[in-house]
Amino acid sequence: MKKTSCILLMFCIIIGSFGGCQKAQLKNYIATKTLSENQKQIVDLLSTNEHKYLLFDVKTEEAYKGINFWMETYKNGKLVDSPLVSITMTNDDGRALDGEFAVVINQTPDFQWTFIYSDKVGGKSTSTSERNTNYCSGINGSCTINQPVEIEDGKEIVIYAAAFNQGNSIEAFDIPKLVDGKYLTECDYVHLIKCKFTK
């Protein structure tokens, strides 16, 4: 437990120090965070086979009151264990969003997910799932969004996807392919991290 707490503390310090932001043509968007070379080196230093780190920027020109992040798990195409971890925040002062969302995935000995959302004005929320032994074996692959995605009122956005199969191989995929119903049924397990923002 102390090891996990120490890693999370270091991770929070690092993401809190990131000053740069990925520029986008969209007025309201979520995007994978663009890191400087020094920042990439720090994340690479912390990353091991045991831990995976995901970083995103959230920026809007319009005001959004509801902020939601959650993870869904599918077994052979059917939704199970939802949500294992989630964050729900309310922005009552009618301002645009300028925040960072981070995910820490502990992969061994059991899967465990931690969500962290921090707004530059000062709001912060964290949530950690229970350890889960269902997804510890088999072939797996994952992907995140590769370009900024437009935020629209009430629109669910998939920002990360992972697929698991007990067989010897897994077909190459991206997020649009993985959220397709047919592909979901071909995977033993699928994890989807989603977000939604409401006015």
Image: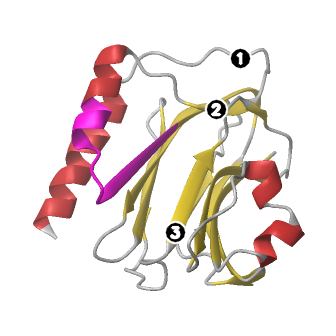
Residue at the location (29% across, 45% down)? 47
Residue at the location (64% across, 32% down)? 31
Left/right placement of residue 196 relative to residue 132 reads right
Amino acid carrying label 3: it is: Ile
The residue singled out by tag 2 in the image is 31
- Classed neighbour count for the residue bearing mark 3: other residues with Cα under 10 Å, few (<14), some (14–19), many (≥20): some
Quarter of the image where the C terminus is located? top right
Judged by depth in the image, the label closer to the viewer, 3 or 1, is 3
Amino acid carrying label 1: it is: Ala
Give how far across and how far down residue 63 sits, in percent: 75, 33
The residue singled out by tag 1 in the image is 24
Q: What is the number of the mark on residue 83?
A: none
Tell me if I can see residue 75 in this picture.
yes
Judged by depth in the image, the label closer to the viewer, 3 or 2, is 3
173 part of magenta stretch: no
Left/right placement of residue 123 relative to residue 48 reads right
The residue singled out by tag 3 in the image is 139
